[in-house]
Image: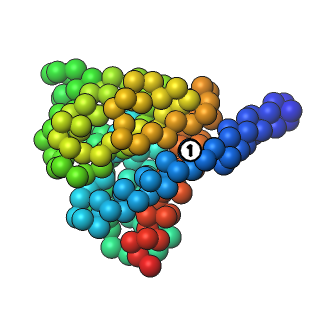
């Protein structure tokens, strides 16, 4: 059993090592930090969406902005789009689960806001529809995916495509990269 545990830990480390040594990925992370910092500085909002564990990651990272990361500072306007369960279940029932994020993006976001979507495959229909509406409304889209980027590759202004096809390893790297972005955005805004 210990060798299995070590193997799983090593797989996570290996994925993160690939991220660490990928200059394209590092540049994408840096660009995301700058874009999000500029959006907040301009009074814009950052929205998050995802499904399952990725929804939990989206909510977690939104809270790092709206709450705090390291610094005691003012709240930043960030929210995960799935937190209103009455809305979520009504739209899923009355329209389609594929529409849950797109309707909110259409209804509550503004040009210049940032939409961050998490999908390990890059093919979650509800995230894709949200990104399509976001592009129409002139939001900046940041996709967090696995290796291929899936269909989100074409809809993302910035793509964080973790070099793995293993969902747990992808999600572990998503939260690491998300924490890096939160830390650096907070540091830039609140020196």
Q: Kindly tell me whether residue 97 is visible in this rendering.
A: no
**Numbered-mark total:** 1
Q: Answer with left or right where residue 135 lies relative to residue 127.
A: left
- Dot 1 falls on a residue whose secondary structure is helix
Residue 172 coordinates in the image, percent (x, y): 59, 41
Vertical comparison of 129 with 79: above or below: above
Residue 104 coordinates in the image, percent (x, y): 19, 39
Q: Kindly tell me whether residue 164 is visible in this rendering.
A: yes
Q: Tell me which residue sits at (85%, 35%) in the image.
A: 2
Q: Answer with left or right where residue 147 lies relative to residue 89.
A: right
Q: Tell me which residue sits at (43%, 71%) in the image.
A: 188
Vertical comparison of 32 with 57: above or below: below
Which of the 4 image quadrants contains residue 82? top left
Which quarter of the image is occupied by the N terminus? top right
The residue singled out by tag 1 in the image is: 24
Report crowding for label 1: few under 14, some 14 to 19, many 20 or more residues within 10 A (C-alpha): few
Q: Tell me which residue sits at (26%, 56%) in the image.
A: 45
Q: Nearer the viewer, residue 121 or 132?
A: 132
Residue 121 coordinates in the image, percent (x, y): 48, 25
Q: Tell me which residue sits at (44%, 58%) in the image.
A: 33
Which of the 4 image quadrants contains residue 142? top left
């Amino acid at each position: 059993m210990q060798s299995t545990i070590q193997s799983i830990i090593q797989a996570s480390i290996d994925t993160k090592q690939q991220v660490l040594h990928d200059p394209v990925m590092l540049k994408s992370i840096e660009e995301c930090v700058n874009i999000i910092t500029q959006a907040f500085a301009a009074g814009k909002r950052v929205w998050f969406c995802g499904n399952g564990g990725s929804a939990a990651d989206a909510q977690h990272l939104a809270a790092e902005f709206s709450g705090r990361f390291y610094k005691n500072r003012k709240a930043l306007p960030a929210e995960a789009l799935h937190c209103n369960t009455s809305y979520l279940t009504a739209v899923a029932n009355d329209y389609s689960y594929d529409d849950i994020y797109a309707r909110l993006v259409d209804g509550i976001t503004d040009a210049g806001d940032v939409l961050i979507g998490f999908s390990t495959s890059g093919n979650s229909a509800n995230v894709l529809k949200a990104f399509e509406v976001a592009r129409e409304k002139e939001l900046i889209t940041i996709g967090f995916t696995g290796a291929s980027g899936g269909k989100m590759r074409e809809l993302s202004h910035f793509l964080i495509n973790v070099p793995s096809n293993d969902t747990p390893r992808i999600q572990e790297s998503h939260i690491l990269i998300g924490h890096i972005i939160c830390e650096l955005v907070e540091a830039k805004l609140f020196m």
